[in-house]
Image (spheres, rainbow, N blue to C red):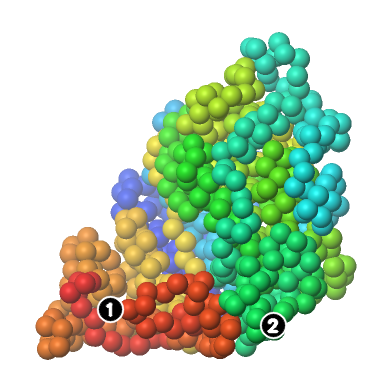
Amino acid sequence: MTTNPMGHEFLLGAYKALYKDIIRWIPEVNRKSLEWDQIHLERLVLDRGQRYFTIDLPEFGKVFEQSLASGSLRSQSIPGFHKLVTSRGNDARPRLFWALSSRVFKYDGTLRDQPCSTSIFLIRQLCYLFKKLKGECSEHFKFAAIADLYSVETTLPEPSLDWEDPIRALTWNPACHFADGTPCASALADVDGAAGSIQETGNGFGLHLQRVFDLLGCAFPLLETEQIRGRHGPGAVSDGTRNGSKYSFPSWPAKLQSLFPFDMHASTNFMVDGSSPTDKEVDSKLICVPKTHKGPRLIASEPIANQWIQQGIKDFLVEGFERSYIGTSIAISDQTQNQQMARIASFGGLATIDLSAASDRLTCYVVERCFRKRPDILSAMMACRTPTLFNCLDKKQPERLQLKKFAMMGSALTFPVQSFVFFGIAVASVLWVRGLRVSIENIKSVQSEVTVYGDDIIVPVDSCQVLVQSLTALALKVNSGKSFWTGKFRESCGTDWYNGECVTPCYIRSDFDPAHPSSLSTIVETSNNFYKKGLWSVSDYLTCRIPYRLRLKLAIEDGSVAIKGFFSFMGTQIDHLRKRYNRSLHRWEYKVVNMVAQLDAPRPDGIDRLRQYFTETPDPAVRWDPRVNGRSVPVLRERYAPLYSGV
């Protein structure tokens, strides 16, 4: 008997449990084919290793989705997915997962008139079960991602303004627009699809796009720099030390000082104590963050001073969205709107568009034109933008990279700015296709069909061609593998839909590891996700990975109580937990195990501590710990907790 390599037992066990759920969901499914699948999956993982579950199967998932969109199975060369040979000839449906794919596609590979949405969900679940398994990707993928970052930078257009001089940007420059004869402007002039009165004016798409942004920019109130309140987010900083405080400013660049004086924005006492940072410009720092086994996510940690002001400007922009008509289409802190629009889109009429490396391709060239009518906002963003990236990860690439992109992921301004830019381009595309003149009334009339969350865009199908052309003209890249406007499959903001039915898979991110306490909460949450989806065998399999002694200290709850544990539709069960009566608080309490964050951040002292207190403005009635928002180490602790909160 063949022995599975270490780790494969967990992966194959999850698939065996999933196949049990498939049989329970579809009792009439071809069971011999399912048995063949399980045997073949075991052979494939022995031959190709863990990457078959983390890379190869997700790759087929993408092919499957594109096949749903096009209406016929697309050719592919992924191991295991060869065509089934029968007495009637070659079956166009792949041998692996044939029992389910035969309920979606016909013998010749064309989509059935009424494909089984349950089978679509289960095929995607099989493909993506371990797509997000925690672990470092290989060095090959990491260096390839960094090389691609440098390669993309060489293709980006140069900005027209001097981004190192925010004072000069305070003066409106009417010569800077999307039809000014630059290469990008020339590409925009080739955008077609105009109809009605727009076509009669003789103006190109570039001027049309500029008018849209000039109007949208007026939705924000006046940005007065003295009213910007700096703060810090959860991200890392490039000029901080491990034991240092983010509330200590080693430098405050002259560019930042020109609009945001240190004594007004970061000093607690107008610098009467004599403290003054240097005016040195600090680079952002390239960081690899685990994403999938196919490649990392590249982000940049920002300098302390820049991040401080970026967060303040971000708050200004978000508040501007919420208080204006733009906020009905851009919800910065809520993905629900895009998710529900994606469901509606799956019935037809709306498209979901996704961009590849959107933050790496959104340029200063584009941003300066989108905000040209708002020099107050543009100059403020210029002042806190970090122009240079420091690379210490790949010695084959230059150590420093002068950025033509607006900002990388890691900057607080990346998400709100790209949401605004993509919303404006989407609205302009809809107006252009429908022949509507640029006006606030017409923008409001079409924006109910346009929603944007970062680089997830939902627009009417009739404007897709113009939107893709305009994005491409501005050096942005549409992700064709994750953008859908034909067929009935749509995806946006982590949810997937087919003809109104949710086909979003669940992901297993890790096994339980006693050496890593955070894995307990991860596997409990994952088990609950599968349980709520109705994949009870997988949920039970994950639950059994937790040692029995720990399971006995976790509640079984239905979401109505404060104690969190294993979810159940059958109600709360806590009889197995030790309990006590708290005479001081007059309540019953139950002993449970949970993960707590043991603070590992330094305590700031002196001026830094005072600056943090004024920034966080804690409740004076509650004991304040300056380390709460700092680093923490997860540990498992047993404690007594009430059944209901507030009791």
What is the crowding at mark 2: few (fewer than 14 residues within 10 Å), some, or many (at least 20)? Answer: few
Secondary structure at badge 1 equals: loop
Q: Residue at position x 60%, y 56% from top?
A: 313
* Residues packed near mark 1 inside 10 Å, few (<14), some (14 to 19) or many (20 plus): many
Give the quadrant of residue 117: top left
Quick check: can you spot residue 511?
Answer: yes
| Residue at horizontal 68 percent and vertical 70 percent from the top | 262
**In the image, 142: left or right of 642?**
right
Quarter of the image for residue 351 reads top right
Mark 1–mark 2 CB contact (< 8 Å):
no
Question: Percent position (x, y) of residue 167?
Answer: 78, 53
Left or right: 152 in relation to 612:
right
Q: Nearer the viewer, residue 44 or 628?
A: 628
Q: Regarding mark 2 in the picture, which secondary structure is present there?
A: loop
- Residue 58 visible to the viewer: no
Cα separation, mark 1 vs mark 2, equals 52 Å
**Residue 552 falls left or right of residue 310:** left
State which mark lies toward you, 1 or 2. 2
Task: Name the kind of residue labelled 2 in the image.
Answer: Ser
Taking depth in this image into account, of 458 and 390 the one nearest to the observer is 390
Q: Nearer the viewer, residue 339 or 121?
A: 339
Q: Earlier in the sequence, mark 1 or mark 2?
A: 2
The quadrant the C terminus occupies is: bottom left
Residue identifier under label 2: 275
What residue appears at the point 69 percent right and 66 percent down from the top-left corner?
Answer: 261
Residue 554: numbered disc = 1
Work out whether 453 lies above or below 470.
Answer: below
> Residue drawn 64% across and 42% down?
421
Amino acid residing under circle 1: Leu
